[in-house]
Image (cartoon, grey):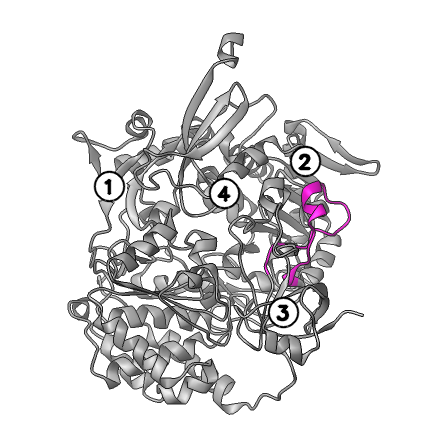
Amino acid sequence: MTSAAVSIEQKHYSTCTLCEAMCGIEVTTIGREILSIVGDKKNPFSEGHVCPKAMALKDLYDDPDRIKMPLEKTASGWQEIPWDEALDKVANGLFEIQQQYGVESVATYLGNPNAHNMGSILYGPYFYRSLQSHNRFSATSVDQLPHHIVSRKLFGHQSQIPIPDIDRTQYFMIIGGNPLASNGSIMTVPHIKRRLKAIQSRQGKVVVIDPKQSETADMSSEHHFIKPGTDALLLLAMINTVFATNKEAPARLLEFAPQLLDVKDYILPYTPHKVATKIGMTAAQIEQLVSDFCAAESAVCYGRMGASVQAFGTLTQYLIMLFNMLTGNLDKPGGMMFTQPAADFLPHSGRGSIGNFHTRVRKLPAFAGEFPVSALAEEMTTPGEGQIKAMVIGAGNPVLTTPNGQQLDAAFENLDFVVAVDFYMTETTRHANIILPPVTALERDHYDIVFHNFAVRNSSKYSPAIFPPEANSKTDWQIYLGLAERLDKLNGLPTDKYQLLWDKKPTGVVDDMLQMGRYQHAGKPISIKTLLDLPHGIDLGPLQADLPGAIFHNDKKIDMSFDYFMPDLTRVDKHFFEIDLPDDNSLQLIGRRHLKTNNSWLHNSKRMVKGTNNGLSRCTAQIHPDDATKFAIQDKQMINVKSRVGEISLPAEITHKIMPGVISIPHGWGHNKKGMRWKTAEQHAGVSVNDLTDEMVIDELSGNAVLNGVPVWIEASV
């Protein structure tokens, strides 16, 4: 780069990758310096909207704590080593562990940032396959696993998840979701606040059902408290009411789901009167919800994080889909609709196998080649054949984000070899023997492989890297492909395919998918060149009715899978109606999100963590005034919160916005362990809510972790 070029101010049009919203951004630079990041007003999907997180992309890029060269842990401390040496040592270390203990002795864990990284998505699997190990884990089983299982069973593919068509709906019911904080989540939706207001401005309704009066509930038309973990009962009663009031109207869906109405036999016992006291609502409220939903010209029921990470999360997501179907709101404008992405990865990806193999200790089933992360610690610590001895962590921090984090932290300490693909030394990666740091999001090409598939409107956008690669830097895909090639060579396998992959690059794979896709521009298939010529992206129109084409089953029918889901009603009955739980003064724990800090990486950005909440940090325990009085707790007072597995201390925040009997603690905090290297996060340490969650309590239907509805006990700190 010439000195003249360094001094020239340039504008680049990219995509924010810090959440699912895919907001277009305008990044102004001089040389390798970022001057500003603002919303791209010409982006047809986000139309200039951007949330405060976008500037954190600059903070991550500029962060002095960011690791830029491979680090090796030695007797004299961490030492930088050259890339080739680092990759050789990692490949040899993993190979030697497997030679000594078997292929299952090496495990992988992938964090959520991988879903925002086309290189990791497309080339990471070559590395996982080179390990030949079934011990694969990810954040999926502390997040959205129920969605994937429901879609695999009903529609034939784990990622064929229909999305609320909120731009055309007249009634939007949100169960256990807070899109104003998450910017969607399994619903890619920039400028969610404007879109929710638009529903109300066209005389529609936004209804939130949640144990907490969230930011979304604050602006809703209607909010109802519900006891944590009881959403399945609410959905059963709502479906019961549909039949009891003769409001079932599946219309054309019966052509594709001929068994749909047979659900009536399963839900007959679950009347609104039977479930009302269990869920904390009245029978009249339940009946009115159904009446209003069915009276709307178009309506959609959407359940997200709070509905998923509970003991009956998979059944809840299944019942949500049935409710939409029975009311005729699947594959209908304004209802739940399938997307039509330009680069459609579904035909080229696994549909999602269920139970092909099981964990060694608890015999929990794998889904799509991954085990439930709640089993990770025991698979590390339980001796015997197949015990995990080494771990590769890709952009994840499971010590903070998975159940019983203290136990997992101790388990990592005893592994023989740990590798981290991450640019921070976190609570988890501090256990690594070698850290391989990839570049940040603005230094690599980007196309949203995953989130165009979950978008509320079809569009296409390619974002070339804003900066050319620095010397001695590597992207995630280069790291994974380099390791895969080395491991295959060590195992005596052919490596001819790798040269093609190095030459093609992930961008070439995306280009192939685009050109094989359904869209054209100016009479030609959309390609990477098309998108480079249109740097703001292309609008491809609203979601379209797509049945039966959206179904991946060979017979092009929706498989109701009653035999898989409905036996879980036995567990529902036992849990809610056959066991008399003692009044033990426990509270029900739920999590929560904040717009600026819903990813622990962002806790090292000063602008993301600055500011206070009525003089408190964001890591507080929110409780209702009635519970504060009951336990003699004052606002801002330090309290102890205890569960079966652990105990934490943090400030109380007394608020009417939480349901009595419930306590809310945000996730992602707990930056108080020795050996980390992110200074800002340590200054705003907080505590980890997952030191309270219980790895032994899971959603038995899926193996998903239970993070909501965990019983805890509180007392004022002495």
In the rendered image, is residue 678 in sight?
A: no
Front residue of 364/373: it is 373
Q: Residue at x 64, y 55 (%)?
A: 400
* Mark 2 or mark 1: whose residue is earlier in sequence: 2
Question: Which residue in the structure is indicated by mark 4?
Answer: 52
Task: Please name which of the two marks, 4 or 2, marks the residue nearer to the observer.
Answer: 4
Task: Please name which of the two marks, 2 or 3, marks the residue nearer to the observer.
Answer: 2
Q: Give how far across and how far down residue 52 sits, in percent.
A: 50, 43
Specify the amino acid type for callout 4: Pro
Question: Which residue in the structure is indicated by mark 1?
Answer: 540
* Mark 2 or mark 3: whose residue is earlier in sequence: 2
Magenta stretch prevailing secondary structure: loop
Q: Give how far across and how far down residue 42 sits, in percent.
A: 32, 33
Crowding around mark 1 (Cα neighbors within 10 Å: few <14, some 14 to 19, many 20+) is some
Q: Give how far across and how far down residue 704 sits, in percent.
A: 51, 66
* Mark 4 or mark 2: whose residue is earlier in sequence: 4
Question: Which residue in the structure is indicated by mark 2?
Answer: 65
Specify the amino acid type for callout 1: Leu
- Element at badge 3? loop
Q: Are marks 2 and 1 in contact (CB under 8 Å)?
A: no
The residue range painted magenta reads 666-690
Question: Which residue in the structure is indicated by mark 3?
Answer: 694
